Amino acid sequence: MKALDFITTEAALAISFTSFLFNAYEYHNAEDYRQSSLALTRVGFDVVGITFDVMSTKYLSIAQGFPEMMARSSLPVTDFLKRVKH
């Protein structure tokens, strides 16, 4: 399952980067203001998508041990929630 997480995250990064390249090319070849503005908007969204993909890859590698850590916890979640409410 962990391998599938990394594969899908890396595939999303590759697709986002490919989309960025196509939209940057479209911006470069725009003939008027409308086309360039539309392509630049798409490039902006692509940059945000690439940023999210990179950050999710980073946090996915950090959070790998989190479920095991929670399973080994001596305090069950229900007891924790009871203590938090009071």
Image (spheres, rainbow, N blue to C red):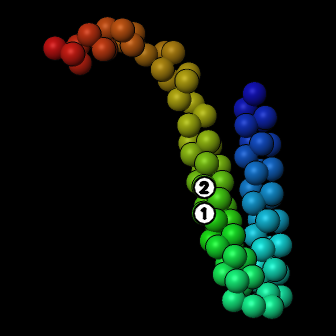
Quarter of the image where one finds residue 52? bottom right
Amino acid type, label 1:
Val
Percent of width and height locating residue 9: 73, 46
Quarter of the image where one finds residue 28? bottom right
In the displayed structure, would residue 15 be above or below residue 18?
A: above
Percent of width and height locating residue 75: 36, 12
Name the residue located 31 percent from the left edge and 14 percent from the top edge: 80
Of all residues, the one furthest to the left in this rendering is 86
For mark 1, what is the residue? Answer: 48
Mark 2, Cα crowd under 10 Å, few <14 / some 14-19 / many 20+, is some
> What label sits on residue 64 in the rendered view?
none
For mark 2, what is the residue? Answer: 52
Percent of width and height locating residue 56: 61, 48
Amino acid type, label 2:
Phe
> Disc 1 on helix, strand or loop?
helix
Q: Nearer the viewer, residue 49 or 77?
A: 49
Q: Are marks 1 and 2 in contact (CB under 8 Å)?
A: yes
Residue 54: in sight, yes or no?
no
Percent of width and height locating residue 64: 61, 34
Q: Nearer the viewer, residue 43 or 15?
A: 43
Name the residue located 80 percent from the left edge and 50 percent from the top edge: 11
Name the residue located 16 percent from the left edge and 14 percent from the top edge: 86
Q: Distance between the residues labelled 1 and 2?
A: 6 Å
> Disc 2 on helix, strand or loop?
helix
Does residue 24 appear to the left or right of 76 in the view shown? Answer: right
Tally of numbered tags = 2
